[in-house]
Image (cartoon, rainbow, N blue to C red):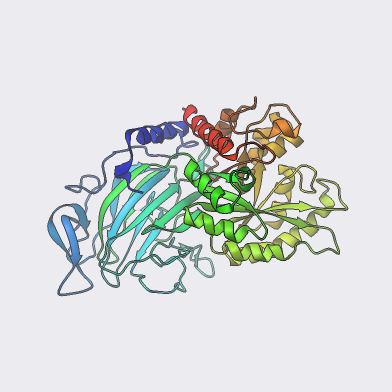
Amino acid sequence: MDMARLNRTTIVAAWVFAAIYGMCRECPARASGPTQYDPKVLTGADMSAWRGDTGDWTVYGDVSVSADDEKLLVGKSGAGTMLNGPKGRTVNLVSKAEFGDVQAHIEFMIPRGSNSGVYFMGRYEVQIYDSFGVEKDPYPGIECGGIYERWDDNRQPQGYEGYSPRVNASKPAGQWQSFDVVFRAPRFDAAGRKLTNARMEKVVHNGVVVHEDLELTGPTRAGMFADEKPTGPLMLQGDHGPVAYRNIRIAPAGPLPFFTFDNGMQDAKHPTIASQVRMVAELGYDGISGHAGGGLGELVAEMDKHGLRAHSVYIGVNIDEGQAPYGPEMDNTIEVLKGRNSILWVFMQSGRLKPSDPSGDARAAAILNELAGKAAAHHLRIALYPHQGFWMETVEDTIRVATQVNRPNVGVTFNLCHFLRTDDERNMEKVLKAAMPRLFLVSINGADSGGKDWSTLIQTLGRGTFDGAGFLKMLYGLGYSGPVGLQCYGIGGDARDNLSRSIEAWRRLNAGLR
């Protein structure tokens, strides 16, 4: 996105959201935004935005590939563009300002064969590389737009958790390229213990989405720091080859991604998937959660057209011995979603066992271990879905089973309406805290506090007596930084009206938390 287009209202709204979390180093449990925020770009007439000795970095008006050497860049007089010296090897640049949650726009140029990187918080690298026309590299994450791998001398292999971009969006060397990134900092409690990992919410390379909702378990290789903190500087790699940067703009990241369940966009006025997805995009939702089945491929294709994320797909598993745990729709769903880091939203049923009966755990864990391997091979995750009346009925059930599976791509869901149906609101913070290390998705809706009837447990967001603002404050305070979904089942009425009122309530609830 072009930060220059942010109007005053948007900037103020972003600052309001920054205030929600406490953007200061003195509040490590909540810090998630800039400790210092200069609304100007970090590239200007001089190097004053950067710390200490800036080596051979020089400010120019523009750069281009050298006529004498295709592996070098040369500058033209002026301001606004930074080049890492005539030889293309100098010190790394480190910003004076420190940041947590940010949205960043960065433009860069490299000549043939060159290499650089952008390190968020000085720790988590989005790679810059001459990757035009190259297939996926055997070294995952080295490609331009990749998330560079982590490194441990005591592991085999030593490099791990490198993430290739899902699409090669590189331009030829010598052309200006861009990254637009929404980054979420790791969360910590008051004692400095990490609650949740850093997250690349979205990485867009030259207008093409290459990563979404990607957790980073620690700093990537060659970062400034081996530890993790609530805030850190932006670092630009300057010692790996010629590179130029311009139009570096940083702003607070804004509210978490908010998506809708697909059943909330269906009514007589919107009879086609295309019309439903178009409506959701127009209203400003980040994505949609779908159902497994024949229409899933069309739904995902329409979301791609509108820049919406396929956050999750709802699909069931049967744990009874002697029965197939799932049908061909599972493989079809994986095929449609492959490479997207999307989530299989798995509910689990049994015709023989009562809800929450732990005697089904071993069978459930065996099925999930097999399914997790399939999902991981296609860069997908699994979030266990608690559903009142099913074998996996409560959040505690999902935590118990996910702990037995113990796979990094298997997590849990907190679904507000099913929690209210099966538990006591007074237990909510305890349950959320227990779920937090594995919490992949959360769903919310308007509801009546203390009610158990479905007609009052699922309302449009902002309606009912349940304290939605208090819930979000609790959720954020516990360190959650992932997507939030709107539960819509059975609401009925006009879909556009319901979705419009709900997203307005979402924005109002977030802003009100200041």
Q: Residue furthest right?
A: 352
Residue at image position (61%, 33%) is 460
- Whether residue 139 appears in this view of the structure is yes
Outermost residue toward the top in this view: 465
- Residue displayed at 44% across by 45% down: 229
Q: Is residue 470 above or below residue 289?
A: above
Q: Is residue 397 left or right of residue 505?
A: right
Count of numbered tags: 0
- Place of residue 249 in the rendered image (x, y in percent of width and height, measured from the top left): 31, 46
Among the 4 quarters of the image, the one containing residue 18: top left
Residue 478 appearing in the image? no
Position of residue 320 measured from the top left corner of the image (x, y, whole percent): 84, 58
Q: Could you tell whether 352 is left or right of 472 in the image?
A: right
Q: Residue at x 79, y 54 (%)?
A: 361
Q: As displayed, is residue 29 above or below residue 270?
A: above
Quick check: 331 above or below 474? below
Residue 388, horizontal then vertical, whole percent:
77, 42
Towards the viewer: 497 or 326: 497
Up/down of 347 relative to 109, above or below? above
Q: Position of residue 64 (x, y in %)?
A: 19, 65
Viewer-proximal residue, 381 or 156? 381
Between 395 and 135, the one nearer to me in the picture: 135
- 249 to the left or right of 216: left
